[in-house]
Structure formats: C-alpha cells, structure tokens
C-alpha cells in the first residue's frame, strides 16, 4: 500500500510540474527564440513532452476503473506516440548537429528552419503510424488487470509489438544518437583552436541522452519480463508501474535542459554579430 501511495504522490507532483515547465518551454522556444532549425527541433520535442504529461490523468482513470478499455487503449497509444516521437526527434537533433559539424557551409544554406518544420511533420507522422499500429498491445500483456478485458489477447502480436517498440523506439535511435555525438566530439577535438557552432548545444544534447536512456530502459525491460510470464507476480507488476511513472518524471526533467537553450542562443546571437569572434561557417540559418 505504501508503494502505490508513493507512486501516486510522484504522479501528482509530476503532473503540475511537467505541465508548467513544458508550457513555459513552449513559450520560450516558440516565441522568444530566434527561429533556427535547432529551435524547431527542440520545440517539437517539448510538444511531445507536453502532450504526454498532459494525458497523465488517463492512467489514473483506467487504474481505478479497470473496465474502461478505451482509457487504457488511449493511454497506451499516447505513451507509444511519445516514446517514438521522443526517440525520433532526439535522433534527428543529433543527426542535425552532426551534419552541421561535418558540412557547415552546406548546412548554412540548406538546413533551414522551414526544412526542419517539414521534417518534424514527417517524424510526427512516422511516430503516429507506429503508435497506432502497435501502441495498444503492450498494455494488454498478461497481468491481473487483463482479466477484466473484453477481448482476446493475441500473444504473437504482443511479442511483435514489444520487439518493435524496443528496436525502433529505443535501441536503433540510441545507437544513431551515440554515433552522432561521438562524431561531434571527435570533430570538436580536431578543431580545438576553431570551435564550431555545432558543439554549442552539445551539453543540452548530452544531458537529454542519459535521461532518455534511464527513463525508457526500465519501461522496455519490464515489458519483456511481463511478456515472458503467464501470471506476473506482484513484484513484477510493481516494477512495471514504476517504469511507467519514471517515463512521466523524465518528461519533467527535460524542460530543465531546454531552458538552457535560451542562454545558448543569446550567446550565439551575440557572437554572430561580433565580427571579431564570428565565423560564417559556424552560423546556423534562421528564417
């Protein structure tokens, strides 16, 4: 009883904190920032966190009213949408910084905010496609709650869903992100005497990666464990509940890193307007 009370308290703290912090981030990145491709990417990432944390009450609805299958399906689909969109957007941000590092002149001309906007729409469409196809299956893995469901469980499709969500929504994006970050760091060391603009938001990106890894790894691990158990023990169900709560808490920490962007962009603008320190190859196009 104490364990579930702690989880409820964490959720009650995460909901107002996440809504307020992510709402402020949306205002900062959407209204006060210079409209660059990086700002567009981080804005999309903040939108994903805001939608996810805003739907936290749905999880309480089907927990306390198990017969509401629509609430369980909707909450599962939104969770899956947030997982895929977060992974894809973070991957896109990493690749964008990598391209800006490798080909700064080309990126200055072609990596515009308008292009990032359309690429962001594609990422959202791709995330929605995966979440609508498999997002409703992982919540229906064998558990004590599933006995109240009014539909049969397709165990084969559930296994496919778990595998695809882990590979496409976690492992592959994480590998691409790590490769991009290593390349950026390697390029920064080679150009130690000429710092490049692509490394300025690097500390934000390096902060988001551990939170993404720690926030979603338990989620996938417990779903794999839950899938292998016909009747999961109470300890496994508690672990799965904690993993879900951890994803919401993760959405509250992300705004802390986003807000540092304001300082980064102000410093960048000041440097860009100073002919003694600015380097045209380091500028990122704005629209």
Image (spheres, rainbow, N blue to C red):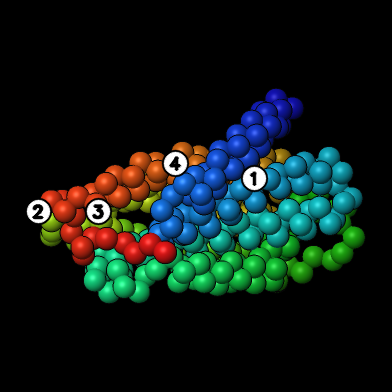
3D distance between C-alphas at marks 3 and 4: 21 Å
Q: Quadrant of the N terminus?
A: top right
3D distance between C-alphas at marks 4 and 1: 18 Å
Query: Where is residue 53 drawn, in percent x and y?
Result: 64, 45
Q: Which mark is residue 40?
A: none
Horizontal relation, residue 271 to residue 129: left or right: left
Tell which of 212 and 101 is nearer to you: 101
Q: Counting other residues with Cα less than 10 Å from the Cα at mark 2, is it few (<14), some (14-19), or many (20 or more)?
A: few
Q: Is residue 221 at all visible to an observer of this figure?
A: no
Nearer the observer: mark 3 or 4; the answer is 3
* Secondary structure found at label 2: loop
Q: Counting other residues with Cα less than 10 Å from the Cα at mark 4, is it few (<14), some (14-19), or many (20 or more)?
A: some
* Secondary structure found at label 4: loop
3D distance between C-alphas at marks 2 and 1: 43 Å
**Which badge, 3 or 4, comes first in the chain's sequence?**
4
Residue drawn at (37%, 51%) of the image: 205
Q: Quadrant of the C terminus?
A: bottom left
Q: Are marks 3 and 1 in contact (CB under 8 Å)?
A: no
Vertically, is 12 above or below 99? above
The residue that mark 1 highlights is 53
Q: Which mark is residue 259?
A: 4
Q: Are marks 3 and 4 in contact (CB under 8 Å)?
A: no
The residue that mark 3 highlights is 272
């Amino acid at each position: 009883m104490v364990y579930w009370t702690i989880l409820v308290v964490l959720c009650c703290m995460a909901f107002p904190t996440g809504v307020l912090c992510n709402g402020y981030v949306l205002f900062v990145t959407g209204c006060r920032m210079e409209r660059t491709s990086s700002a567009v990417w981080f804005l999309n990432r903040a939108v994903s966190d805001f939608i996810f944390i805003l739907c936290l009450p749905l999880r309480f609805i089907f927990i306390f009213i198990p017969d509401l299958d629509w609430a369980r399906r909707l909450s599962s689909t939104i969770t899956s949408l947030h997982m895929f969109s977060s992974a894809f957007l973070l991957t896109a941000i990493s690749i964008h910084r990598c391209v800006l590092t490798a080909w700064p002149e080309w990126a200055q001309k072609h990596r515009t905010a308008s292009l990032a906007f359309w690429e962001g729409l594609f990422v959202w469409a791709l995330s929605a496609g995966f979440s609508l196809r498999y997002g409703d299956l992982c919540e229906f893995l064998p558990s004590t709650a599933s006995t109240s469901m009014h539909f049969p469980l397709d165990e084969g499709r559930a296994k496919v869903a778990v595998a695809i969500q882990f590979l496409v929504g976690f492992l592959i994006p994480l590998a691409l992100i790590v490769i991009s970050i290593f390349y950026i760091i390697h390029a920064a060391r080679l150009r130690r005497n000429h710092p490049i603009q692509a490394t300025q938001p690097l500390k934000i990106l390096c902060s988001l990666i551990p939170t993404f890894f720690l926030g979603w790894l338990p989620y996938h691990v417990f779903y794999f464990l839950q899938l292998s158990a016909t009747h999961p023990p109470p300890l496994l169900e508690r672990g799965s509940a904690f993993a879900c709560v951890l994803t919401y808490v993760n959405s509250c920490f992300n705004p802390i890193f986003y807000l540092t962007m304001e300082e980064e962009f102000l410093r960048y603008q000041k440097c860009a307007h100073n002919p003694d320190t600015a380097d045209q190859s380091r500028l990122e196009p704005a629209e």
